[in-house]
Amino acid sequence: MGQFLGIGIGAGLVSALLFGVLLKATALAIILYLLAPLPILIVGLGWSHKAALVAAVTGSLALALVVQPFLGLGFLAYLALPAWWLAYLALLGRPGADGTMEWYPTGRLLAWTAGTAGLAFVAIAVIAAPNYETFHTQLRDMTRTIVKIQTQGRAAVPAQTAPDAADPDAPKPDASKPDDTLKDDVSDALARIAPGLAAQGLAVLLVFYLWAAAKIVKVSGRLPRPWPDLPSTRMPRRVLGILAVALLLTFTPGYPGVLGVAVAGALSAAFAIQGLAAFHDRSRGRPGRLALLFGLYLILFVTQGIAFVALTLFGIADTALDRRRPKDVPGRP
């Protein structure tokens, strides 16, 4: 017990320090902040989920006492508890009928990662602004600022041809009036989808954190479960039902609507990752596989958003059709 307490406290303090440097608002501080969940995941995968929970609580208390309570609570809800929860799920296992250990399937772990990201975003939003109207106003102000910065960077519109001097009654265009209505519409649309985009990014980061922490622990020889076959990752079909519920929630007002947008955005990232895994899986054994994979990642790099949508649709189809080999073990949480 003393060992996991000590390693958990140490990891929690390191994680809190990485998170707290964000207040310096420098490029290096942002990079260090992005590494904050790794110590919690590393001790969770290398020692136990109890050590990860100690790390999460220790880091949150340290930030709350040394900096401010809000920062500690935000760290706990947004990064620390999600890291502990994913480490706990990753090490879930039970003895099979033949005596071998059956580990928690990576497809379900991917689904939980997306759900955790959606819930974490809503949790930090409620902590920051318990009143939904305050949250919505802050979000709209932020998106308006983004739109304003983008429009200011554009070149000035060329002056329009002057009306014919022979026709003094011809209407003169009003070029001085900005299109505020269009800007407001764009700002509203961005504010509407912003929770989905934020949760989408968080889901990708949590997947990366879990993979990186597992790699580090595996190199040290402390990873209890064997390295899974990642290309065979496949989420259960019922995740499609969760996506449908999330999309329906987007039409509801208040924070339930924000939850729907956030979960839908996070699940889109999970389906895109599954689509990427399915491409790896289906290309195994095919001639020119390396060229195919290189072409896929090149397209991802060049097209970005368009390729992401295509991968998401591919992942949804892969889940719905259920034609790949691996099957999840029934009866798991």
Image (cartoon, rainbow, N blue to C red):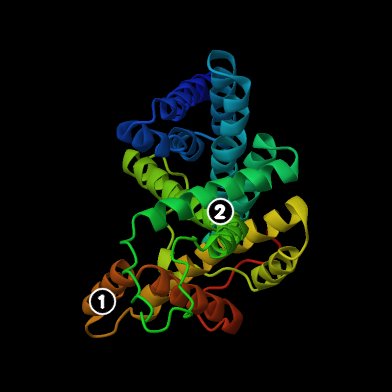
Q: Position of residue 159 (x, y in %)?
A: 33, 69
Q: Position of residue 146 (x, y in %)?
A: 46, 51
Horizontal side, residue 39 vs residue 158: left or right:
right
Q: Can residue 281 be seen from the camera position used here? A: yes
Residue ID at (78%, 57%) = 253
> Which quadrant does the N terminus fall into?
top right
Q: Is residue 291 above or below residue 117?
A: below
Q: Farthest residue to the top: give it.
A: 66
Tell which of 175 and 285 is nearer to you: 175
Q: Is residue 199 above or below residue 43?
A: below
Question: Which of the two discs, 2 and 1, labels the residue nearer the N terminus?
Answer: 2
> Which quadrant does the C terminus fall into?
bottom right
Residue hosting label 2: 199
In contact (CB < 8 Å): disc 2 and disc 1: no
Residue hosting label 1: 295
Q: Position of residue 44 (x, y in %)?
A: 51, 37
Kindly report which numbered mark, 2 or 1, lies closer to the viewer in this rendering.
2
Three-letter amino acid code at the position of disc 1: Gly
Residue ID at (33%, 77%) = 161
Which of the 4 image quadrants contains residue 46?
Answer: top left
Label 1, residues with CA under 10 Å away: few <14, some 14-19, many ≥20:
few
Tell which of 88 and 313 is nearer to you: 313
Q: Is residue 44 above or below residue 179?
A: above
